[in-house]
Image: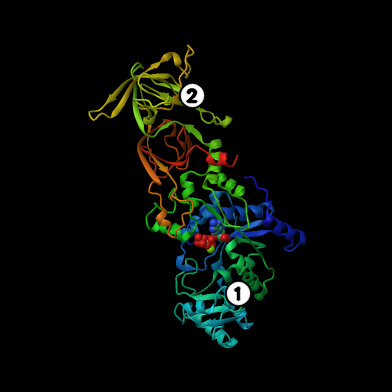
Amino acid sequence: MATPEYNNFIQDFITEDTESGRYGGRVHTRFPPEPNGYLHIGHAKAICLDFGIAEANGGLCNLRFDDTNPAAEDVEYVDAIQADIKWLGFSWDDRMFYASAYFDELYNWAVKLIRDGKAYVDDLSPDQVREYRGTLTEPGKESPYRNRSVEENLDLFERMKAGEFPNGTRTLRAKIDMASGNINMRDPVIYRILHAHHHQTGDQWCIYPTYDYAHPLSDAIEGITHSLCTLEFEDHRPLYNWLLEACEVPQAPRQIEFARLNLTHTITSKRNLRRLVEENVVGGWDDPRMPTIAGIRRRGYTPASIRNFCNDVGVAKTNSVVSLMQLEHFVREDLNKTASRMMAVLRPLKVVLTNYPEDLVEEFAVENNPEDPDAGSRYVPFSRVIYIEQEDFMEVPAPKYFRLAPGREVRLKGTYFIKCQDVVKDEAGNIVELHCTYDPETRGGEAADGRKVKSTIHWVSAAHAQDATVRLYETLFLTPNPAEGGDVMANLNPKSLEVLEGCKVEPSVHGADPGSRYQFLRHGYFCVDPDSTLERMVFNRTITLKDTWAKVAGK
Ligand code: ATP
Ligand code: MG
């Protein structure tokens, strides 16, 4: 995998630090997911950046589970997160860590802060803490418990740890400045009481550090040099730095913020993604309509396409929304190079070639991928009964409709010209099959006498076809900004999934593993779903063929 070159403000900071020798020339980043949900496309951007920029600078990147809130976390997520990062093509080698493994050190630092008069146990309730905090325009009020003695604080904190107090009755707060213009500096809570089982530490702890407290110190423990995070943490940076200084860590990491990735028609909030799963709007975290890594993998997106997209989007200092079309462009670009072409009939119409010998089966060599000279070719069987798309026939052809119609001749891709002689209907008047004749003098798709046809249609031999179910997708949300108006559920697209049964695919796909990707001619790119069986394969449409973004962006 090629390492992209970075030319952005983050790289500038890193270069500044390596040139000044601030970290002895080291570059060490981390990707710190909280295991409370599956990773999504926004995380992919952070992963590409954290791992990519470390590698581009000859550095390292850790995977660290930021598991300080046992209430919402689960090992299911711990496992899924690892699988997703690996699939994207990145490796943390042996550097996978848990913030929970640092709970002892974090506790000892908290004791140090108390001893140094920089932290106190507060008895205010969560509501009171909020009330005392003040607002953007008004300073906060000091808690009546703020000036407890060091001894009392040590005793109470010890007893918090020992489990003497119920949830929410006390907190440990950093003693900074209740009048600070930055609300994050108004004596932030650094420990809370939570009698909860933790997926890594079990029942060992009933006090847990907050994210703001655990994060800078975990970074310091791991020797992180550049701690990249999203913009909402910009206002937390003074606290990040305050804690590193107050705890006197040997070498303070540098926090650098960048804009979150937002995509049109997509949500990237774990809370809302979890709602979609829990309220059965989708089949699970890996539903192919989900913007999760697991979902887009099942949908058929490739790791390379996601990495290319993330690099193209780049990093910025201001939030913006990227068009979903841009992501889809990179998916098409990669699949066009790598996906084998196949013929598949999604809505079959039976065609009998009345003058074709009953028992004859011919095989036609077809190129697998015109974009890839090494892809080779395959043989496609042809016989007397075939399927074509229902939409490739019109009994009364509309103006400018050049495909099959009564009395009209078209080319069957790669084989012969056929001409429609008869339309067979059931009692209700529905078309059930067509009777056509083929012209043996057009073998290979060109007429010996030089006559032309106006269209070429694809087909599958009925006796050889692979039965398939095909799932077609649209965006999960109707509006470009699903969060607009408050409730994302109000913007759901009722047509986000269409299931076609009875599809017919050329036999070469038979037995292909889940995850195999193809271009079905004229229909788009498809991926074999894990629900497939040998008798009835299941395909997800990854994406249609038409690349609107390439046109818009002049690519
Ligand atoms: P949520 O708030 O939806 O739960 P999160 O940001 O808290 O998501 P984390 O597990 O804490 O999720 O994220 C791990 C890392 O991924 C963080 O460094 C975070 O900044 C980054 N990240 C999360 N969402 C995005 C996004 N949309 N774009 C870029 N980076 C993101
Ligand atoms: Mg977070």
Q: Secondary structure at mark 1?
A: helix
Q: Secondary structure at mark 2?
A: strand
Confirm or deny contact between disc 1 and disc 2 (CB under 8 A).
Answer: no
> Which kind of residue does numbered mark 2 sit on?
Ala
Any mark on residue 365, and which?
Answer: 2
**Observer-nearest residue: 286 or 396?**
396
**Pointer 1: residues within 10 angstroms few (<14), some, or many (20+)?**
many
User: Which of the 4 quarters of the picture holds residue 536?
Assistant: top left
Q: Residue 313 location in percent, x, y? A: 60, 49
Disc 1 target residue: 185
User: Which of the 4 quarters of the picture holds residue 239?
Assistant: bottom right
**Pointer 2: residues within 10 angstroms few (<14), some, or many (20+)?**
some
Q: Residue 383 location in percent, x, y? A: 38, 22
Classify the position of the N terminus by image quarter. top right
- Sequence-wise, which precedes: disc 1 or disc 2? 1
How many numbered discs, if any? Answer: 2
Which residue is found at the position 42% from the left and 14% from the top?
440
Say left or right for 297 vs 2. left
